[in-house]
Image: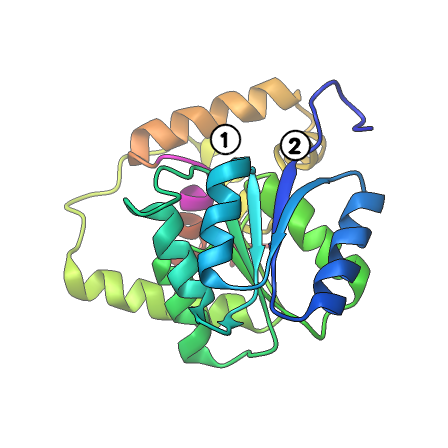
Amino acid sequence: MSHDDRPPARVVVVDDHPLWREALSRDLDQAGFAVVGTAGSVAQALRVVAATRPDLVVVDLMLPDGSGVEVIRGLRGPGAAGGFGGAVLIVSASGEQGDVLAAVQAGASGYVVKSARPEELVDAVRRTAAGVPVFSAGLAALVLGEMSRAERDVTATPSTPRLTAREIEVLRLIAKGLSARDAAARLGVSHRTVQNHVHNVLGKLQLRNRVELTRFALREGYDDAS
């Protein structure tokens, strides 16, 4: 049962190792998530997601018939599970730069390594479901540095809309990984006030959600201030 009245986040777990898949599913069940399906391949993952419409997909990078990147592309594009609007968290044994970047550029909301402790994996799923991008230690700077460089090569925005001092405060806290509720407590304002600031910033920056907002904040260095 969740602490508020919202139903638990619906999760699909995709991994070709049955024991690991079952262990993570069990940990997520015990943590209050609703594991609505599991899969062991790219093709099976797309079928299961299309049938269950989860809020979040947790997927391994290496699968027998392809990769987690192909799962993401199948979910985001016009394929069998096209129109999927949830989040995707990659959980992989690989921490290689190329693998991480490929996953994030395909649309992954986060990337954690399998060597993380079970409670860390569960927390990563919880934060991803809440719209917070999650990366294992050491990966965030790498990913965002590369993405920033790539985006500058493609195009530069003419100007960044002016944000108020309080909006910048909120942006800095989001860049540090705080939830709206935690940011509100830090600033001494209501949760709704922080949500309003986030909504206003999204509009000014023409971003769609908190994942994009967090990427923007990290890319622009809003996490550097203490």
- Check disc 1 and report the residue beneath it: 166
Say if mark 1 contacts mark 2, CB within 8 Å: yes
- For the rendered model, the colour scheme is rainbow
Which is more N-terminal, label 2 or label 1? 1
Q: Which mark is residue 223?
A: none
Q: Quadrant of the C terminus?
A: bottom right
Q: Classify residue 119 as left or right of residue 40.
A: right
Q: Is residue 13 magenta?
A: no
User: Residue 156: x and y, percent?
Assistant: 17, 54
Classified by dominant secondary structure, the portion drawn in magenta counts as helix
* In this view, 76 is above or below 83: below
User: Residue 39: x and y, percent?
Assistant: 59, 57
Label 2 SS: helix
- Check disc 2 and report the residue beneath it: 187
**Residue at 25 percent of width and 42 percent of height:** 160
Q: Is residue 15 visible?
A: yes
Q: Is residue 87 visible?
A: no
**Residue at 34 percent of width and 64 percent of height:** 147
User: To which quarter of the image does residue 143 belong?
Assistant: bottom left
**Residue at 71 percent of width and 67 percent of height:** 18
Disc 2 residue type? Leu
User: To which quarter of the image does residue 203 belong?
Assistant: top left
Q: Please report the bounds of the magenta region as a residue range.
A: 208-213
User: Residue 193: x and y, percent?
Assistant: 57, 20
Q: Around disc 1, counting alpha carbons within 10 Å, would you say few (fewer than 14), some (14 to 19), or many (20 or more)?
A: few
**Residue at 64 percent of width and 23 percent of height:** 191
User: To which quarter of the image does residue 103 belong?
Assistant: bottom left
Q: Quadrant of the N terminus?
A: top right
* In this view, 156 is above or below 96: above
Q: CA distance from mark 1 to mark 2?
A: 9 Å
User: Residue 105: x and y, percent?
Assistant: 35, 61
